[in-house]
Amino acid sequence: MARAAPRRPGWVDGTPAVRGGSGDEAGPAALTYPVLRKITDAVGGVELCLPTEVRSIHTSRTYPAGCQHLDGAASVDLLRQRRTLADDSQDRDRNAQRFAAALVRRADERGVLHDPVRVSRLAADIGPHLTISSASGSLLDLLALVPRLESAEVVGLNLPAVLVDAPAHRYEPDPAAAPELLAALREDRLAAWVAAHPERVTGLR
């Protein structure tokens, strides 16, 4: 679930949640753009599908609607964009969700997530640059959960938010909709909430 809160410059924040019958859950993690670029290049780039065109204000590159193969530099450039998107940071977060799913798929295709040696090397390489919630365990614990996504219907969710300061591009949680989502998350009713609010779901496959 992506957040609408302001980010630290050069950081990507995410909350990959993997829930199974045992109630296992992975908490928030954050990594820098340079590390994200390195990981993307390490798996040979990603195949990312966009619902609408994205124009970069940093490089003037245009990323067309549809599917395209992106290397690390292009991926980071795309993930930074929000000013040219209809819903600003909300759409940026949705693109980040699509990218995260594409990266996991690519790593799985390359066999990275099922090879203990490669997983250990990846953890050693990016671990020092990754901030993980203490409730999530170690990086290896998180990586061990990722293959379980293969059998799941993976979707992206944004915390419902409202624009409160357009010039500053500042959002706050929607007082009408956000509490319901947070309650569903706490009470392990997220699947039911998703079924009841399909308009708030970002399809990632």
Image (cartoon, rainbow, N blue to C red):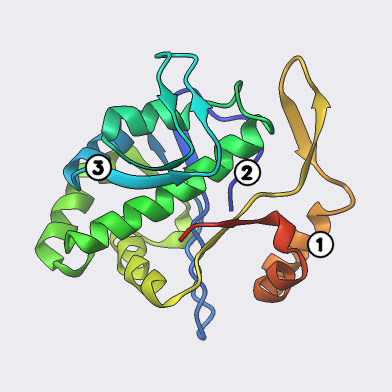
SS type, badge 1: helix
Q: In the depicted view, which residue is nearer to us: 100 or 117?
A: 100
The quadrant in which residue 145 appears is: bottom left
Q: In the displayed structure, does residue 116 sit left or right of residue 36?
A: left
Residue beneath disc 2: 3
Nearest to N terminus: mark 2 or mark 3 = 2
Q: Nearer the viewer, mark 2 or mark 3?
A: 3
Above/below status of 53 relative to 191: above
Above/below status of 183 relative to 101: below
Q: Residues within 10 Å of mark 2 (few under 14, many from 20)?
A: many
SS type, badge 3: loop
Question: Could you say which disc has been placed on residue 45 in the image?
Answer: 3
Nearest to N terminus: mark 1 or mark 2 = 2
Q: Amino acid at mark 2?
A: Arg
Q: Residue at x 61, y 21 (%)?
A: 83
Q: Nearer the viewer, mark 3 or mark 1?
A: 3
Q: In the displayed structure, does residue 177 sit left or right of residue 86?
A: right
Label 1 to label 2: alpha-carbon separation:
15 Å
Q: Residue furthest left?
A: 117
Residue beneath disc 1: 180
Residue 151's spot in the image, x, y percent?
A: 41, 78
The quadrant in which residue 185 appears is: bottom right
Q: Residues within 10 Å of mark 1 (few under 14, many from 20)?
A: few
Residue 148's spot in the image, x, y percent?
A: 37, 74
Q: Amino acid at mark 3?
A: Gly
Question: Could you say which disc has been placed on residue 33 in the image?
Answer: none
